Image (cartoon, rainbow, N blue to C red):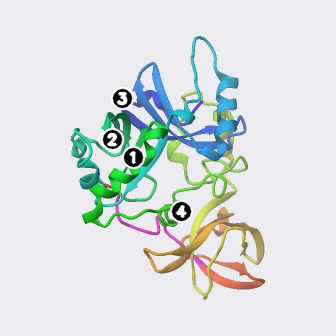
Amino acid sequence: MTCNDAGRLSDYQAQYSALLTPEGTIIDDIVVYRFSAEHYFLCINSATREKDVSWLKSRAFGNIQMADVSDQYVQIALQGPKSESILQKMVDIDLSSLRFYWFTTGTVVGTDAIISRTGYTGEDGFEIYLPPEKGEALWEELFKAGETEGISPAGLAARNTLRMEMKYPLYGNDITEETTPLEAGLGWIVKFGTGFIGENRLREIKAEGIKRKLIGFEMVDAGIAREGYPVVVGGEKSGSVTSGGYAPSLDKSIGLAYVPVEFSDIGGSLSIEIRGRRREAKIVSTPFYKKRQK
């Protein structure tokens, strides 16, 4: 069901992966959590819940038992360089021993919880899963624990700028059922030889060579590239900006877009149509923000 090799996971290890169609396009990007060889927990995008669950159930076979437990959890993500010291005040487990893309279970605000260290911001961070009725208590306790550390609330718009600075793709924008992992720069999660749905088609695409590629760009001319703005390369329109905006960590306007492979070289130029006027941009290496993940 997933294009990455879940067979390589150890107990309490997590893995970034994707569900693919037979055509090799992306149904959703997900995180696979392995509790044991017979118990896996999938974290999917909430906006694609019904589609993902339906797809998984339609392919279940043998004695596999599957349940949609979305309503049994609330998830709050604590992100940033001080996240470990803040959360450590609230749990009785040693968070320093929890490695990136691993998880554990413990007690938080008096209830059993799943605590993972995956993040989608480019910074260190933790995700706490616990019953919905405990969500408000967790929120309040986090702010008490982080008061002296400068903790502050952040919504999806803030998360969006951070993940974009790292060129982490957003489902529905940069990756969809019209795109493949190979085009999106996610070839590293495609493990050929594991028999995943879509593998045969992706083998063909790899042999043929991809025709377009997701690139990162920064604006040269004044202007902010927004999602949906037309992109012009080689004098021709080539789709539109998939993600774009002002990057606070870089003090630049940046964005992502698919362009023909022959126009995808670093340093290459392209234009973004902003309110009917073409503004120059240049293709740059990614991630835009170079700080390494802990």
Residue 10 marker? 3
Q: Residue at x 66, y 25 (%)?
A: 57
Residue 11 picture location, percent across and down: 36, 27
**What is the x, y in percent for residue 135?**
44, 45
Q: Secondary structure at mark 1?
A: helix
* Mark sitting earlier along the chain (4/2): 2
Distance Cα–Cα, label 2 vs label 3: 28 Å
Q: Earlier in the sequence, mark 4 or mark 1?
A: 1
Q: Position of residue 6 (x, y in %)?
A: 47, 30
Marks 1/2: CA–CA distance: 7 Å
Quadrant where the image shows the N terminus: top right
- Amino acid type indicated by mark 3: Ser
Which residue corresponds to mark 2?
109
Q: CA distance from mark 4 to mark 1?
A: 26 Å
The residue identified by callout 4 is 160
Dot in front, 3 or 4 = 4
Secondary structure of the residue carrying tag 2 is: loop
Q: Mark 2 vs mark 3: which is more N-terminal?
A: 3
Left or right, residue 214 beside residue 37: right
> Which of pointers 3 and 4 lies earlier in the amino acid sequence?
3
Tell me the distance, in whole angstroms, between the alpha carbons under discs 4 and 2.
Answer: 28 Å
92 relative to 87, above or below: above
- Please say whether residue 225 is one of the residues in the magenta stretch: no
Mark 1 or mark 3, which has the lower sequence index? 3
Disc 1: CA contacts within 10 A as few (<14), some (14-19) or many (>=20): few
User: Which labelled disc corresponds to residue 137?
Assistant: 1
Q: Quadrant of residue 268?
A: bottom right
Q: Is label 4 in a helix, a strand or a loop?
A: helix
**Mark 2: amino acid:** Val
